Structures are given as C-alpha cells and as structure tokens.
Amino acid sequence: MITSRRSSAHGSLDRSRRRVRCAPMLFVAVLLAALVVVPLVGAVSPAAAVTRAEVVEPTETTEPTPQDSTTPTPSLAPLESDTPSPSPAPAAPTIDSPAPGSFVGGSVSVGGSRDPGQKIQLLSPNGGDPLCLIEPDGSSTWQCGVRLPSGPDVTLRAVVEGDSGLAATISVRVLQPPTVTGGPTGTSSSNGLVRGTGYPGATVTAVLASGQSCTFTVDGSGAWACLMQGLVSGPEQITASQQTGFSAPDSSPASDPVTLQFDVDAPAPPTVVGPAGGSTVPSGAPYFGQGENGATVTVFAGAYSLCSSVVSGGTWSCTESGSGVADGSYDLRAVQQDAAGNVSAGIAPIRVSYGTAPVTPTPPAETVPAPTTAPQPTTAPTPAPTDSPTPTPAPAVPPGTPSATPLPVPSTPDDEAGELPPTLTVPGGWNDPTQFSTAVIPPWTVASFPWLQAGLLTLGALLLLVVPARLLAGTVSRARNGRPLFQTHRFAGRNRAREEFEVAPTVRVNRWVGVGAAIAAAAVFVLLSGPVAATPSYLRLLLAVALALAVVNAAAALVPQWWGARALHVDVALTILPRYLAVIAVTAVASRLLDLHPALLFGLLGSVVVRSGPVLAQRGQLAAMRAGTLLVLGLVALLVVGVLPEPGGFIGTLAAEFANTVVLVSIGSAVLVLIPLGSTSGRSILAWSPPIWAALTVPAWLALSTLLSPWLSLWQGEGPTVLIWLALAFAVLSVTAWAWQRFVLPALR
C-alpha cells in the first residue's frame, strides 16, 4: 500500500514537472501562431487581437527564456500600429453588360459593379462629353441606358471620376437602324423610290406595311435608295433594317415607321400658253401655261433647258435663265414632274425662233414651220423684221406687252397638238437607264451575299426540275419503245423523197440575212421579258440586246466547231433552228408574266451538227464544249459587270446593258440546254459521261441561283408562288409516272 502511494505520488510529481516544462513551449507556439495568423486575417479587429493576447498571457510561466521575453514585444507593436490603418484600396469598376464582343442594336443598358462611394463616368467612344454620369448612391452596382454609334469595334470605358486609373474597358459590335428620309426628292411623297441613310457597305432592306420590300447596298457616303414594285397610289408605312458583315447573322432593329404618300401615276403633260408657235422669242421673254398643282414644269428648246417653275393655282410661269439660246429655230417642249417624282410625257413641239433677222433665213430650209405660220394671221407681221437686223427690241413688243393678250393664241398650238400626239419625253432620254442596266448584281459587291440561299435554290432546282425531267423523259421513251414523241412525217408527209430531209431547200436565202433576221426577232422577244416604255432608251437597249445575242451565238457555234475540227477531226456544220425562237419567246414571256427579276432568258438560235454520222462520244463532247462555252462566257461577262463603272451616258449605259444581257442569256441558255430531255445537249452529255454532265449542270444552276438570290426579296405578286407550285406539281407528276412504270406495271403483268 505504501509502495503504491509512493509510486502514485512520484508519478504525480513527474506529470506536474512535465506540465511545468511544457508551458514555455506552449507559450512560444501560441505567440508564433499569432504572429503568422493576425497579419493575414484582415477581418480581425485590433481589439480582438488585444483580447487574444490577454487570454494568452495568463498561460505564461515564471521561467521565460530571453527569446520568449523579447518575442511578445514586437508581436504586440504591429497590432497596436494596425488599429488606425486605412480601409483597403478601392477596387476598379467593372462592365458586366453587355458582354464583350456581343452585338448591340438600338438603345442598350450598360452596367456593372463599383465601390459604393465611387462616381462612375461612361466615356463616349467618339470623345467629348461622357455618355452618362452615375452618382454614388450607396449601391455597389451602376447602370445607364445609352445609344452607341455603329461600328465593328466600339469601345466602352467606365472610369472613376477623379482617378482615371480605376477603369474598365470592353468592345462590342454595334449596328443602329438605318433611316428613311422619304421619296426621291426627300419629301413624304414617292413614286415608289425610297431613300435614306445607313452604315456604308451595309445591306438595307426596306419593308412596307403591306408586305412589299426592296433591298439596296449603302454607298460610301451612307446613302441608299431602292424602288418598290407593284405599288398602288396611297399612304403606306415603311420601316428599314440593315445588315453588315460584322453583324451577320444579326441585323439591326427596324427603324421607326415613316408614312409615305405613294403616287405611281404620272401627271398629264403641261400646257404652254406662251410663247405662241411660229413666233420669235426675245431674250428674257416669259414662258407660262397650266399644270398640276405642286408639280415642277421644265421648258426645253431643243437640247437647251430654259427654265423651271412650280405650278401654283393651276398655272406656272418662268423666264429664261443662263446664257441664252443660240440663234435659230427650235422645237419648244415642256414636261412636269410631280412631288412624288413622276415625270409626264412631253407636250407636242411648238416651233419657235430665237435671235434676230440674219438667222431667220435658215428656217425656210425646213418645211416644218410653214404650216404653223399660215393659219395664224396675227403672227404674220412678227417675222417681218427680216430687213432690220439691228432693232432687237421690236420683236419683243408683240409677245411681251400685255400678259393677257397671249391667252387667246393657244388655239393654234392646240390644233397642232391634235396633229402631233404628245409622245415625246424629256430630252436626253437616250441616256436613261432600263431594267437591263443593273439587272445583274455581282456577289462580291454585296456585303453579306446570301450564299446559303443560292445553294438551297440550286438544290431545289435539281431536285424539282432536272432530276424529275430526266425521269419523265425516260418514262415516256420506254412507253413508246424509243419512238420520238412527235414524228416528222405526220406534218411533212410520209411519201416524200428521203433526200428532202437531208438536202437544203432549193430556195436560196442569203445566210447572213437569215441570221440577222433571227437575231432581230430574238432581241425583240428578250426585250419583252421586262417592262418597255416609249422612250429612246429602249431603242438603245434593243441594240445592246442584239449585240449580246450575236456574241453569245457566235461563241456557242464557233468554239464547238473549232473543237470538232481540231480535236475530233470531224466536219461540223452550223444550223439555225426555228424552234429555238419559240423557246426564246416562251422564256421571255414567262419571265414577264411571272415578274422575275432578273429574267430567265434563252438566246441560242442554232446548233452544231456533225455531217458524217457522229458517234455517241463525238456528240457528247461537242455538246459539252457548247454548254461549257456558254457557262464560261456568262461568268466572264459577270466579272466585266463587276468592274464596269456606274452606267452613265449613251456608251456607258449601252456597255452595261450589253454585259448584263450576255450574263443572263449565256447562263440561262447553259441551264436550259443541260436539261436532259429529247435531243438536247444535256441528253447527249449524260449519255456520254454522267460525271461531266453533273460537273456542268451543278455550276450552271448555281450561277443562275447566284443571279437570282439578291432579287428574291423583290419578287412581288403571285408569280413566284405560281412558279414554286408548278415545279412541285411537275416533280410529283414525273416521279409518280416513273414509279408507276418501274414498279407497279411489272407487278401487274
């Protein structure tokens, strides 16, 4: 028992001694932990640190080492010095919306985070005053609504007022809506032409509330204008949006709606009361008559533009401006343009003279003025001053004295107007543009060309037209055991000599006369594929179309002929096929009825044939060379259209119409001849080499779809819808007939 107590007492003494020796070590460990943790944890207040130190102090023993005695002193000093330390440095603001690189259109709310006491300035990307100032309100967020300028890389910068080093910067893509400024004259009246402003290079689409739309690419100055089709006169609301390469596939928001008063009816020609026909007009003489209120009347003498005046109260009056008219006799004409921009036809010409007596002998060489002076006895004394060339004021007295005296005189010009119908238009009509001046839009000139749309259009044409056409042709051929659908002897006679089908007719006609007549007839049909006006510019267009048809037919005939002679060593002849004129007429009239822009045109007048029994490969190669030549010619002409300047003047507009017609006729002809029907080039190529046929057919249809895609949004009316339904019906009919003959009939038999 005693031993155990001693041992237990001894054990207790040892444990107490261990505690005494461990106490200094524990104290040192606690102080070291405090030195490490307290500076790192900024949330610990100085009061808490002191309290923690006070809690640790009672654990100290009476045996501190010199290191222990000096260590607590520096540990407490920093804690006491931290008590008056300032708050953490302010943080820079952030921009959380919109996201960097995002697309923005219209007004946008810009916002982010900040310290509650910061005043934020949102700087303008263009410099100058800030877009907005956000005062401190105790909130850690900020926000303001702004409208940014358009651009692919618009910088947004938020800075703290008084400390520009605290800032946040992001970049976004911005495209604001375009504007609609009105009709052709900038007013709310329009003849179908709509104008506005937009981002340079953007594609603007203007849409009416009734559904019509038009598209135009903004020029370098920021202006755009496009023509609405199929309108009726009346008020319409219009909006516009735009798209650029950096915004695609997004478009800007629509602009605010603008109400335009559309007037698509041209005004009647004005009337000219004075001067009277057959008179001599002195310098500074007035011109006056009647017209449509609000319209602007312009008076011409030959090629001279004399003066203009706005019709008010049903009448107009103006005096000659500029350097005057050279001495001589001229046809006086007048036209008026209403507020919407519609131009009337010109009045019947009124023959007048300018200058003094020495120039009056020149009119007798012309027999036109003679009838005008005969029925007008009052004006007979007027040309009398031929013997006194010096007194110019003398002729000025009769027309200029009382303003009311000329009013009874218009009876004579009205009689002449009955003999000469008012078919004249504004002088200079030879240079006016037509629908062929800008019929083709090169894809590289469009900011965001609809290539996907062109590809889908090509795929649809192949699936709904080309493949079903081939299936239907094969079905009909098998049903007739290879016999042609139309037999020649039914129309030409069964018992005629065989030589009559192989020998040229005995009636000799000059070959070039026949070719010229065929080209002229084809040019007229092509001209009818679009609207035609009674202006001189359409005579120029007829010339451009005839030249284009001559070039296309020469290329389609001479290149295969050269290939046959050099590569195939066969005798190739050229032949005119009258049935091709029917194809030209059908495609042109169909384009006009369906209102296709641009028109689908066919322009071939003949073909190439091998005189000495061609084999399948020879026919296929000649047909492939012919179709390939048409396709290459059309693509080259498309490049030419892209580099030509804006049509201007007679020669420039003629060149543009020629190049556009070559593109449409070449590609349209290549597409149609490649359809594998009957004895077409496409059938010969497919029988010879299906891969070559596919290599020609797909690019040809893609080229045609490329020409049509930019204009699809302009197609109005029921024409495009009817065309789609016809294509679907044709595809269903062809596939059904093929499936019936291929699968159902064998099962029934």
Image (cartoon, rainbow, N blue to C red):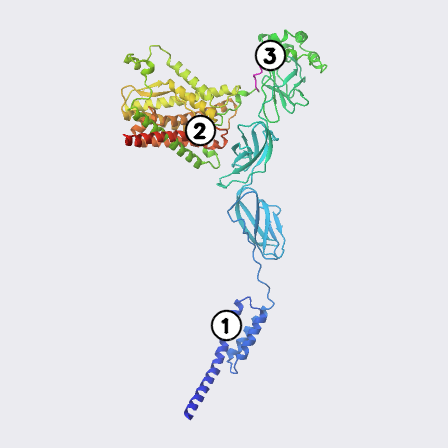
Nearest the viewer among 741 and 99 is 741
Instruction: Categorize mark 1 by other alpha carbons within 10 Å: few (<14), some (14-19), many (20+).
Output: few
For the C terminus, the quadrant is top left
Q: Residue furthest right?
A: 402
Check residue 421 for magenta coloring: yes
Residue 440 at x, y percent in the picture: 46, 29
* Mark carried by residue 723: 2
What residue does disc 1 label? 33
Q: Please report the bounds of the magenta region as a residue range.
A: 419-425
State how far apart marks 3 and 2 are (Cα).
45 Å
Nearest the viewer among 408 and 355 is 408
Report the magenta stretch's main SS.
Answer: loop
Nearest the viewer among 265 and 216 is 265
Residue 428 at x, y percent in the picture: 55, 20
Q: Residue furthest front?
A: 748
Mark 1: amino acid: Ala
Instruction: Categorize mark 3 by other alpha carbons within 10 Å: few (<14), some (14-19), many (20+).
Output: few
What residue does disc 3 label? 418
